Amino acid sequence: MNLNSLTAISPIDGRYRHELIGLSEYFSEWALIKYRIKVEVLYLIALSSTGVIRKLTAHQKKLLLDLVENFDVEDAKRVKQIEQKTNHDVKSVEYWIKEKLTKTPLVDLKEFVHFGLTSEDINNLAYDLMIVQALDREYLPELNQLLSVLGQMAKKYRSLPMMARTHGQPASPTTMGKELAVFYDRLKTQLELMPTLTGKLNGAVGNYNAHQLAFPKVNWLKFSQDFVGSLGLKPNLVTTQIEPHDVLAELFQVMTRINTILIGLDRDVWGYISLGYFKQSQKVGEVGSSTMPHKVNPINFESSEGNLGLANAILDHMANKLPISRFQRDLSDSTVLRNIGVAVGHSMLAYKSTRRGLGKLEINQSVMARDLDSHPELLAEAIQVVLRREGVNMPYETLKDLTRGKEISLADLHSFIDRFNISAKVKLELQQLTPAKYVGLASKIVSLVV
């Protein structure tokens, strides 16, 4: 069968390909080859400033950079043809570049392509560049769109009272906006923790052995530091053959926490829909159940939760596996690294689903108000705290006897308040209180973060 969206094994490249087409620019096999070529080309250009190779003219530098700029699928196929003979993906890139240089004024520099390098010098930098650009151009814009919608909802419902549920039981009132603002703030905090990725360029076992032997007068430590830094990465000068991936693991752990926070959001909103606090707008022609015509299912939040779980399973494995390599290098990270795009893809699918789900919600204020009115015992906390302030002995214990596990009315609470020897002003203060008014600083808390 020919490969297309219907015959693909992975749903990332099948069912959901139209949603994630932009990721092909960064996480496909074509993209990986292109980024490897980019690092090789930039390295060759950088060598021209050290005296290792002759100075390159602006035109010659452009010839090299055009190898990256004009790299297409046919070029990638040629690299893969070479790989069939070499059985080595990075060496195939080197040979492809040399093949291209044969037809240019740079033919004399062929043997300085990949000079002194090991494959990991190219791979770690290529992957870092792929990840950084994919995050900046695809992942973060999608996540920020979700954050924007969440922030707007938090502001809109900042003062809308609802009954909280601690341990799933009726608890002191809050506002819908404040509860959404909690998720918004947690996500923003994690975004601020995203690290700058580290990269290395230092040869077969990290000691610049070949570089130093061939050109001992070049300051290779400074060269490596400057070159990696020029890519927008943090240089790591102390490595084995492999860049340890510690910071890459840190990034994946931040992404995992972002996804975990969103699983919490998905489940809470799902719950609010179940409680009737939210209604979902209907789309003409859509079906909620194959047998129950009345249903409007919270499918966006359920789909998001599933994709977040898949993404986290991959991200968690990568974060735990990638920092470990036997002795100076093994290849167990190679297959794992190729799945970064899968984790990013499932994450982005989830962000899209949650955002769409939030966009379908309509607040059902009457249900929220009815819940509050049906639970006057929510004021027990308020009453006992004020009675403590007024010097009443053991008000908590007395209110516990009155309210715990029992159905009471506001009238019962008012009668209870009348029993105490406190001022008429304080009694009025308590008797005028309703669950809907007992939301503390919820609205102001929203203003702190949104």
Image (cartoon, helix red, strand yellow):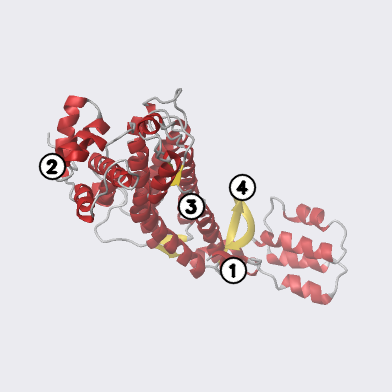
Amino acid found under the numbered disc labelled 1: Ser
Compare marks 2 and 4 and give the one earlier in the sequence: 2
Residue ID at (66%, 62%): 376
Compare marks 4 and 3 and give the one earlier in the sequence: 4
Classify 10 Å Cα crowding around label 3: few (below 14), some (14-19), many (20 and above).
Answer: many
Residue that label 4 marks: 167
Of circles 2 and 3, which is in front?
2
Along the line of sight, which residue is nearer the eye, 419 or 396? 396
Of circles 2 and 1, which is in front?
2
Amino acid found under the numbered disc labelled 4: His
Compare marks 2 and 1 and give the one earlier in the sequence: 2
Residue that label 1 marks: 443
Give the numbered dot on residue 265: 3
The N terminus sits in image quarter: top left
Residue ID at (31%, 40%): 52
Q: CA distance from mark 2 to mark 4?
A: 59 Å
Confirm whether residue 374 shows in the render.
no
Q: CA distance from mark 3 to mark 1?
A: 19 Å
Query: Could you say where residue 423 lies in the image, as x and y percent from the top left?
Result: 85, 74
Of circles 1 and 4, which is in front?
1
